[in-house]
Image: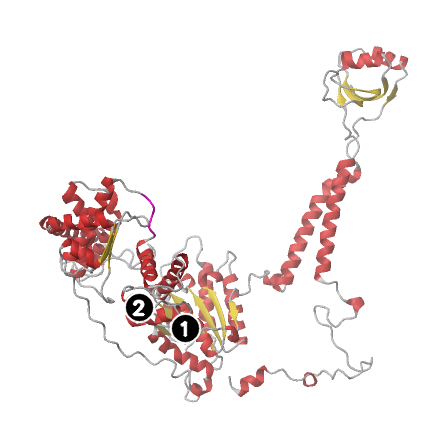
Amino acid sequence: MTDSQQASKTPPPAAEKGRPPASMPRDRGGWRVAPAPDGRGMPDEHKPPPPHRLRGFWMFFVALLALNWIFVLAFQPGTQPRVRVPFSPFFLNQLKDGQVTSISSTSGAINGTFKAKVRYPSNDQKATPTTLFATQVPSFWNTNDLTTQLRDQNVQVNAKNPNPGTSLLAELLLGFGPTLLLFAAIYFIARRAMTAGGGLGGLGQFGRSQARRADPEKIRVTFDDVAGIDEAKAELTEIVDFLRTPDRYARLGGRMPHGVLLYGTPGTGKTLLARAVAGEAHAAFFSIAASEFIEAIVGVGAARVRDLFAKAKEAAPAIIFIDELDAIGRSRQGSISVTGANDEREQTLDQILTEMDGFEPAQAVVVLGATNRPEILDPALLRPGRFDRRVAVQPPDRAGRIKILQVHTRSIPLAEDVDLAQIASSTPGMVGADLANLCNEAALLATRREHDKVQMTDFTDALEKILLGAPRGIVLGREDRERTAYHESGHALVGMLTPEADPVRKVSIIPRGMALGVTLSTPDADRVSYSREELEAKIKVSLGGRTAEEVVYAKITTGAESDLQQLTQIARQMVGRWGMSEKLGPLTLLPSDGAGPLLPGASETSPQTQWLIDQEVQRLVEELHAEVTELITSHRAKLESLTRALLVAETLDSPAAYAAAGVPLPPPAPEPEPRPGPEVGAAASQ
């Protein structure tokens, strides 16, 4: 940070802002402090009540209203329990015996009081004795005789309504109480929203950015914690240097890239690399997933983008990291929406484009975007002036994997037999996240086995668990176990006898995951591209298990489902994407992965061409199936020998498997020559 920037962030003394010192007397003719909007600076008698007091008042008001409602309903007249008795003979007998004290009647309904408590029915011991009763005069009864009997027994007769109904207060509460409660709840929610969002225009927290800010002092990740992707680190070193010393580039008229796009397969370390840039540059770091911009309310995404960029400019130098950028940065070409569902996403994307165009040259704000699918991003997002620089974060090679393993085993005590170079050679294609998981699984396995240090066997077993799945404790029948052994031996034998196939590392008939057996084949070194012969070898190895069952049992089972899926995918890629069909020629006819029906290129082939692709795929697989059948039939003795050894040992490593099949063990591949990597940190250290 330059001296000018430091000066801008140092608050001036109070006297320079127009405020007198604290020792100055506050007379009426002198200065006075204007009250703040929230009441700070007002006299006590004019201050608004604190928010928690208002909240407590409303809660008390609602509780009091509810208690009044319950009280009125519980004690309104006409709610005392009465026993209902028959008019004849029970009521008439009680009247004749002089047991009736008073009655009140309306429309033939009689409510009254007995002199003594009675139980009805009299033979029901569970009935509660009471003096209150109710009955009904039949319409055909002679009321004159009843009137005479009541007068002779000196019964008090009341003319009031026996059920006067609810009181006026109860009716008011029942009528207006729910409405008052509803309005009070709406007012309470609206007040909370205004307080949290700065007014109704803010819609609460909807318009505020959901980005998480990490202070520069709290970011502990540096380039030393990122290994195996030296090329990507070298690309970002210049960004770090610019954030540290912007004047060095401005002197020659250079400007910092507005945005840097990190793309690559999942788990390669894009997020870790972005945090390392912030840690090296000592800049404020704002991180957010692209999907967090989108809400159901249209316009919220654009408002959050504006708020995020405003915070970043205020905290400059700053880095904005948007993960999974393709969630909002998809190409707008061909994205037709009948219901307008894409309007919010497109508005958010437009706002990001506008904000990235609005950067001033002096503003030290960099946008880092990460995606696994750069091919589907909108062209306007990738043009110069927005994401000026694109950095490919590729899976590490063997040397890179060794460095990654060294980083992740810093805090793990390793035994002397642990060879990180051998582990790196056994994990081709694994990325940083996979290797971190491998180290963690090995540490957990060593803890479970009560080892003092993590041993090489812990790493080997953890790798098998990741690649093959955890062993299952099921017992196979003799026939299923034998069929599984033939199936896995077929895979292994075809891999041993096919020169272009990957070497067989392990064969097992122990059920793991969803499979009853596994055959592990991995290359000796990292592979970038494959020839046609190597791809055909992969298809042959996948066909080996099913073909072995056909040769031995003359039957097929459902156990080869995953093998068929894998070989079908490879065959379709060879024919439709990699131009390895003589009939179709060097053409790419299949759409790219993830291309939907509304995206360009999804329907560029005719139905006739699709039919030709299917025919070529079928022809290729049938030809390779015939070759595998002939190979296994001609080496039936090797298949039987390998199967017998597998039934005895259940698991065979590479030397044991090749020896059991009578096939020479392939020589190990030569160690790759180390290549000079890019210099990382040279610019940042200046």
| Nearer the observer, 58 or 341 | 58
Counting other residues with Cα less than 10 Å from the Cα at mark 2, is it few (<14), some (14-19), or many (20 or more)?
some
Name the residue that disc number 1 marks: 225
Identify the residue at image location x=30%, y=54%.
Answer: 468
User: Is residue 611 in sight in this rendering?
Assistant: no
User: Which amino acid, by three-letter code, is at mark 1?
Assistant: Asp
Name the residue that disc number 2 marks: 419
Coloured how? secondary structure
* Residue 471 falls within the magenta-colored stretch: yes
- Quadrant housing residue 375: bottom left
Counting other residues with Cα less than 10 Å from the Cα at mark 1, is it few (<14), some (14-19), or many (20 or more)?
some
User: Is residue 612 in sight in this rendering?
Assistant: yes
Q: Say left or right for 306 vs 521.
A: right
Going from N to C along the chain, the mark reached first, 2 or 1, is 1
Magenta stretch in the rendered image:
470-474
- Quadrant housing residue 277: bottom left
- Quadrant housing residue 114: top right
Query: 471 above or below 281?
Result: above
Q: Residue 439: percent from the left, percent from the top?
A: 37, 64
* Label number found at residue 131: none
User: Which amino acid, by three-letter code, is at mark 2?
Assistant: Asp
Query: In the displayed image of the protein, which residue is found farthest to the bottom?
Result: 251
CA gap between label 2 and label 1 equals 21 Å
* Residue 405 falls within the magenta-colored stretch: no
